[in-house]
Amino acid sequence: MPGIIPERVTARVDGDFVVFLIGMRINALWKVHKWLPVFLAMPRMLRELEADPESGLLESRAWFGLRSPVLVQYWESFEKLETYARDAEGEHLPAWKAFNRRVGEGGDVGIWHETYLVREGEYEAVYNNMPPTGLGDVGETVPASGHAETAGGRLGRTEGDDAPVEADG
C-alpha cells in the first residue's frame, strides 16, 4: 500500500472518465439466503475486472455499513462499463439475472447504482495526509497550491485566491 502523502494535494486525471457508485441494502437481515448471494457476487466481479487491465476499471473502493455496502468505481469510459455489464461471458450479467430471478421486487434486498460521466477538468479533489485515494489513485497527485489552493480554483472558477480555511493558531 502506498504511503501517506504528508501534505495537501489534489488529483490530476488526463481525459474524461466515469464515476460509478454501486451498492446494496439489506432490508431483511434474517433472510440471509436472499442477500448473501448478492453480497458475494461483487468480489467475484472485482477479481475478474482486476485480472483484466483492458476492462476499463481504473480503481474500486468499498465501504461497509451494517446494511449497506457501497463501492465507488472509476472507469475509463461509459462504453467499457456497459460492455462489462452486458458481457454474457463475464460475472456480472449472470449475477444480474440471478438477482432478478431470486429477489426481483420482493423487498428483501435492494440494489442501486449511479453513473456519472466526468469531462476532463470538470472535477476537483483534495487530500491532506492521505495515501493516494480515489482520483488521487487513478491519476497523479500534485500539490494543492496556487490556483489549486481552493475548490473554486481547482474547478477553474476562480484564480485560487478565494480564502482557503486556515488553521487557528
Image (cartoon, rainbow, N blue to C red):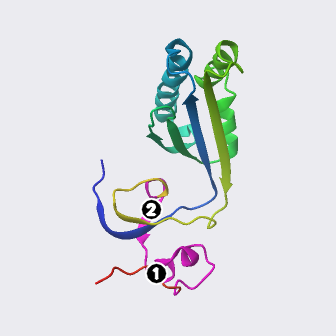
Reading the chain from its start, which is encountered first: label 2 or label 1?
Answer: 2
Instruction: Please tell me whether residue 42 belongs to the stretch shown in magenta.
Output: no
Q: Distance from label 2 to label 1 (Cα)?
A: 22 Å
x and y, in percent, of residue 161 in the image: 52, 87
x and y, in percent, of residue 103 in the image: 65, 17
Q: Is residue 15 left or right of residue 160?
A: right
Q: Residue at x 60, y 83 (%)?
A: 158
Q: Quadrant of residue 20?
A: top right
Residue 3 versus residue 40: which sits nearer the camera?
Answer: 40
Q: Which residue is mark 1?
A: 164
Residue 102, above or below 14: above
x and y, in percent, of residue 87 in the image: 67, 26
The amino acid type of the residue labelled 2 equals Glu
The amino acid type of the residue labelled 1 equals Pro
At mark 1, the secondary structure is loop
x and y, in percent, of residue 36 in the image: 50, 18
Check whether the beta carbons of the residues at disc 2 and disc 1 lie within 8 A of each other: no
Q: Residue at x 57, y 35 (%)?
A: 23
Q: Which residue is mark 2?
A: 140
Residue 22, above or below 17: above
Answer few, some or many: residues within 10 Å of disc 2's Cα (few below 14, many 20 plus, some between 14 and 19): some
Which portion, as a residue range, is magenta?
Answer: 136-161
- Where does the C terminus fall, quadrant-wise? bottom left
Residue 15 versus residue 29: which sits nearer the camera?
Answer: 29
Q: Residue at x 52, y 39 (%)?
A: 70
Viewer-nearest of labels 2 and 1? Answer: 1
At mark 2, the secondary structure is strand
Q: Quadrant of residue 84?
A: top right
Q: Is residue 131 left or right of residue 153?
A: left
Q: Residue at x 62, y 30 (%)?
A: 111
Residue 132 versus residue 99: which sits nearer the camera?
Answer: 99
Residue 19, above or below 22: below
